[in-house]
């Protein structure tokens, strides 16, 4: 039977995934609030486990939207927990980079080129912004590198769109 994995229905496996993720997330959230006394960590723990459940759904039912959403929530959760445990500067840029990495990993599984281009745009934007914010490069160098990157990126996208519409005719 194609709808079963190891003799179990896929929906049953998804329910087991939900139960395990809820129990683990609830335990870690209570641990972070009661023991660690960090009242902001619960959101990122929840994001991580919701991402794991969404990834289980994506791989069980072969859904590309659940794959992207799962990797996005998982990476946001991981970066959020790490940034609260280790004081890292400019957390918003790290979250941008993690969402770009989620798009690139989704491209690896789904072979959708849009995911790859979107991921590259986010990773490069976040990385250049982070390098600028920690004062490795100055504003002039940042703007010149970023504007050149954006020009090349949008020029490449325009060529690909032109080829697509030319091939459709």
Image (cartoon, grey):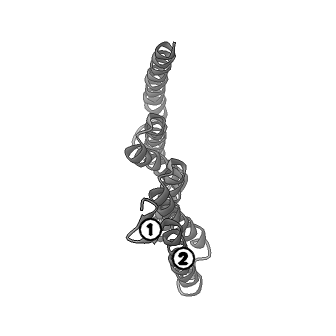
- Is residue 51 visible in the rendered image? The answer is yes
Is 101 rendered above or below residue 60? above
Of residues 7 and 94, the one nearer the viewer is 7
Residue located beneath label 1 in the image: 86
Numbered tag placed on residue 25 in the rendering = 2
Assess disc 1: are there few (<14), some (14-19) or many (≥20) residues with their C-alpha within 10 Å of its C-alpha. few
Check disc 1 and report its element: helix, strand or loop: loop
What is the total number of numbered labels drawn onto the structure image? 2
Is 32 rendered above or below residue 117? below
Which residue is rendered at x = 46% and y = 30% of the image?
A: 146
- Is residue 88 visible in the rendered image? The answer is no
Check disc 2 and report its element: helix, strand or loop: helix
Quarter the N terminus occupies: bottom left
Q: Position of residue 156 (x, y in %)?
A: 44, 22
Q: Nearer the viewer, mark 1 or mark 2?
A: 2
86 lies left or right of 30:
left
Which residue is rendered at x = 56% and y = 72% of the image?
A: 41
Which residue is rendered at x = 47% and y = 36% of the image?
A: 121
Numbered tag placed on residue 68 in the rendering = none
């Amino acid at each position: 039977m194609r709808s079963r994995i190891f003799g179990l229905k896929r929906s049953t496996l998804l329910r087991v995934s939900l139960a395990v993720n809820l129990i683990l997330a609830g335990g870690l959230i209570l641990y972070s609030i009661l023991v660690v006394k960090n009242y902001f960590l619960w959101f990122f723990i929840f994001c991580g486990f919701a991402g794991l459940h969404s990834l289980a759904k994506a791989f069980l039912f072969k859904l590309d939207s659940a794959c992207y959403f799962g990797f996005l929530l998982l990476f946001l959760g991981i970066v959020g927990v790490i940034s609260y445990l280790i004081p890292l500067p400019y957390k918003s840029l790290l979250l941008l980079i993690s969402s770009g990495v989620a798009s690139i990993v989704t491209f690896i599984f789904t072979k959708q080129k849009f995911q790859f281009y979107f991921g590259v745009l986010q990773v490069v934007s976040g990385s250049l912004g982070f390098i600028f914010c920690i004062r490795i490069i100055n504003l002039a160098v940042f703007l010149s590198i970023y504007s050149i990157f954006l020009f090349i990126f949008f020029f490449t996208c325009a060529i690909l769109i032109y080829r697509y519409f030319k091939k459709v005719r």
